[in-house]
Image (cartoon, rainbow, N blue to C red):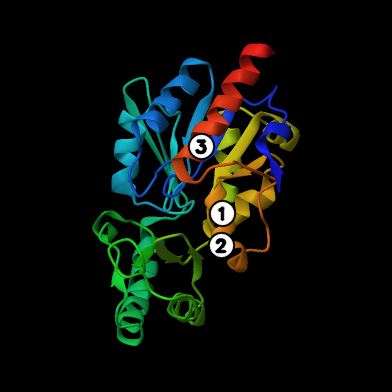
């Protein structure tokens, strides 16, 4: 991984970013990180959060944050609030969602039985597409790596896809995937009609294994420094890395973007 100082940003206009562990610092968004989002928007950059967090959270993010839109539940949908109207684009039908929900209920029962200290994530009630198992957000002390891997194995034994963040294991059925959702959003909402346009004008920043598909697909991918803690879970690492962890790392990236835009 190369330092962000070596990242050429002259064409970047769109920033796809993870939320937890990337914008947050110790589970909160600091004033300086949130101000960085406003500074980027004022400078003409468009920000699209890409998160494993639920639809309920994404409704608020799309409406109240300085963002172009938001991709939620690991690529199951995107919301965009524009000209006083909320656009909600889902990648699975209601019938499919009901079927997947029944399958996830079975996985939930098995996980809670076989991994006793695990919990269903507190935000599960506002999810539409996936099941989030908490191993480090409200579960204290966090579960050891062996227990996290056991949760992953249970999801996979049922044929579900799952990803590990720094606090949850998220699992789902269907074809949703963050990278595909980002590229689809770029075409539908940013009017970038070729892979070349997307790769030259878009950047992705994240922090953990559930960002791996985007680190792999985006030529200009950045990890905040805490990504180093998850190398054992990952095959594809970001191309660039910030000096600092979590939201402080995002602030460093924002400053680099803003400085580059002023000098170009």
> Disc 3 designates what residue?
250
**Quadrant in the picture for residue 184:** top right
Is 80 left or right of 112, judged from the image as shown?
right
Query: Which quarter of the image is occupied by the C terminus?
Result: top right
Q: Which residue ends up furthest to the bottom in the rendered image?
A: 114
Q: Separation of disc 3 and disc 2 at Cα? A: 18 Å
Q: Disc 1 vs disc 2: Cβ atoms closer than 8 Å?
A: yes
> Disc 2 designates what residue?
230
Q: Which residue is drawn at 51% across and 26% down?
A: 46
Q: Separation of disc 1 and disc 2 at Cα? A: 6 Å
**Quadrant in the picture for residue 148:** bottom left
- The picture places residue 82, in percent across and down from the top left corner, at 39, 24
Q: Residue 227 carries which label?
A: 1
Element at badge 1? Answer: helix
Q: Which of 162 and 227 is in front in this view?
A: 227
Q: Nearer the viewer, residue 221 or 174?
A: 221
């Amino acid at each position: 991984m190369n330092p962000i100082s070596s990242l050429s940003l002259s064409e970047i206009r769109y920033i796809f970013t993870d939320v937890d562990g990337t914008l947050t610092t110790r589970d909160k968004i600091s004033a300086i990180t949130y101000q960085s989002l406003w500074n980027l928007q004022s400078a003409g950059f468009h920000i699209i959060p890409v998160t494993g967090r639920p639809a309920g959270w994404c409704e608020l993010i799309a409406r109240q944050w300085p963002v172009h839109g938001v991709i939620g539940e690991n690529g199951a949908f995107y919301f965009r609030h524009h000209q006083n109207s909320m656009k909600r684009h889902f990648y699975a039908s209601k019938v499919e969602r009901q079927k997947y929900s029944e399958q996830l209920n079975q996985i939930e029962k098995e996980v809670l039985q076989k991994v006793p200290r695990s919990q269903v994530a507190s935000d599960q009630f506002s999810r539409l597409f996936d099941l989030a198992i908490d191993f480090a957000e409200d579960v204290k002390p966090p579960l050891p790596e062996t227990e996290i891997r056991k949760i992953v194995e249970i999801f996979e034994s049922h044929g579900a896809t799952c990803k590990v963040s720094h606090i949850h294991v998220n699992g789902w059925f269907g074809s949703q995937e963050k990278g595909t959702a980002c590229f689809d959003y770029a075409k539908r909402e940013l009017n970038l009609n070729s892979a070349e346009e997307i790769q030259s004008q878009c950047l992705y920043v994240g922090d953990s294994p559930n960002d791996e598909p985007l680190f792999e697909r985006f030529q200009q991918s950045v990890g905040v420094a805490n990504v180093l803690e998850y190398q054992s879970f990952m095959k594809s690492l970001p191309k660039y890395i910030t000096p600092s962890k979590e939201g402080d790392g995002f602030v460093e990236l924002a400053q680099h973007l803003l400085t580059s835009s002023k000098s170009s």
